[in-house]
Amino acid sequence: MVLKLFNSAKQNTNEAIAQSVKSLTQYRIGTIEQERFIAYLQSPDSRMLYHANPRLIAEQLQLTERETLKVLVAALKEGIVTLNWDIQCPVCQGIDFAATHLCELRTWHICSSCHHKHESDADEQVRVTFSIDERLRSLPKEANDLEFRSHVDAKYGVVSGHRLLTVQMFRELFPRETMPPNESLLIRQVTILFTDLAGSTALYSLRGDSQAYNLVNQHFNFLFEIVDRYNGAVIKTIGDAIMATFTSPSDGIEAAIAMQEEMQNFNRRIESTNNQLILKIGVHAGPCISVTLNERADYFGTTVNTAARVEGLSQGNDIVFTQSLLNHAKAIAEAKNYNYEQSFVKLKGISEPSRVFHMRITKSSSSNVSEFNLI
C-alpha cells in the first residue's frame, strides 16, 4: 500500500513537471529541448536538482551555456526553478547559500563560516545555481551533497553572476532584479560598447519625424539582435545610442564588426541614398561596478566613461577601440573590408594619452590592406 502511494505521488510529480515545462513554448524553446529538460527535472538523482551548476544542466540539455541560461531564465519566470546567488569565500572556500535574489547581496560580504569580509565580486566569488522549485518537487535532505557539488564544479567550472547579468532575456524578464540602492557588485572585466548615429538631427529634419523614427527603430532592432547573438546585453538606450556589455572582449569586438556589416546591408535596402544611417561605435574593456540606476541594473566607472569617450572619436562607418582589446586582435585582423590606423589621444578625465585604433570600412575588398600593428 505504501509503495502504491509512493508510485502515485511520483507519477503526479512527473506529470506536474511535464505540464509546467510545456509553458516554455511561449519563449521559443523547442520540443526536443523541453523533453530533455523534463527528463533532467525528473532525474532520480536529487543531487542534480539542488543548487545545480548550469554547465551540468547544459550537458543534460545538450545546449551551450548561453542557451541553457535562457532556458533556465524562462523556467525561473514560470516558477519551475529557483535562482540562487551563491557566494564563495576567497579565504576558506566556503559557500554561502543564503541569497535567492540579487537585492540580498551587498557591496561587502562577510563569510558565514570564517567571517572574512570581502567584496562581492561578480566574476570570481558570486556564482549562479538553480534548484527545482519545491512546489513542483520536494527534494530529500540528501540532495544537499557538498562533495557532489564540489566534484561538479571542479569538472565543469562555475557560472559567474556576471554571466547571468549579460543575458538579455534575464534583463527583460526580471528588470527589478537589481542591487539595493547605494550597493554595488564588483565586475573585474567587462567589455563596454557604445553606438550612436552620426547626423541624426539632419535625418529627422530631412526625412520627417515619423520616417526617421521608423528607420532608427529598425536599426535598434538589429543592434539588439546582434548584441544577444554575441553573448551580450543592452544595458540602455540613450537617444539614438545604445550601451551594451559583454563578458568577453572578443564577443564585443565581433559584435561591433557585425553591427557595421549589418548597417551597410540596411542602408542598401533603403530606397533613397540621401541621409542613410551612419553608425559610430566605440569599444573598451576593463573593470567597473554594477549598480542600480533608475531602478535598473547599470554599469558605472572609468571603463564606462572611457568607452563613451572612445565612441566620441568615431566618425561613422568605423569602429574605435582601445589597447585593452589587443589580445583579441585575431577577430579584428580577420575582418574583411577594413583598414586600420592607430593613434594616441587625450581623453577627458584620463591623465595619460590613450592608444586607440580606428577600423575603417574600405570601399572594396581589393583595397583591404591591414595596417594593424601589435607593437
Image: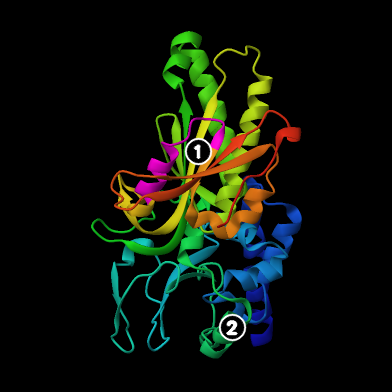
Q: Is residue 302 above or below residue 238?
A: below
- Residue at 23% from the left image edge and 58% from the top image edge: 182
Q: Is residue 194 above or below residue 268?
A: below
The secondary structure type at the circle numbered 1 is strand
Q: Is residue 371 visible?
A: yes
User: Could you say where residue 269 lies in the image, as x and y percent from the top left?
Assistant: 68, 21
- Residue at 53% from the left image edge and 75% from the top image edge: 138
The C terminus lies in quadrant = bottom right
Q: Nearer the viewer, residue 50 or 185?
A: 185
Residue 201 placement: quadrant: top left
In the rendered view, does 255 fall on the left or right side of 31?
left
- Residue at 28% from the left image edge and 47% from the top image edge: 349
User: Could you say where residue 280 lies in the image, as x and y percent from the top left?
Assistant: 50, 33
For badge 2, the amino acid type reads Ala
The secondary structure type at the circle numbered 2 is helix
For badge 1, the amino acid type reads Ile
Q: Is residue 28 above or below residue 223?
A: below
Viewer-nearest of discs 2 and 1: 1
Q: Nearer the viewer, residue 280 or 225?
A: 280
In the rendered view, does 294 fall on the left or right side of 257?
left
In the rendered view, does 312 fall on the left or right side of 333?
left
Give the residues drawn in magenta, as a range.
304-318
Location of mark 2 (residue) = 154
- Asked if the magenta segment contains residue 311, the reply would be yes
Marks 2/1 in contact by CB < 8 Å: the verdict is no
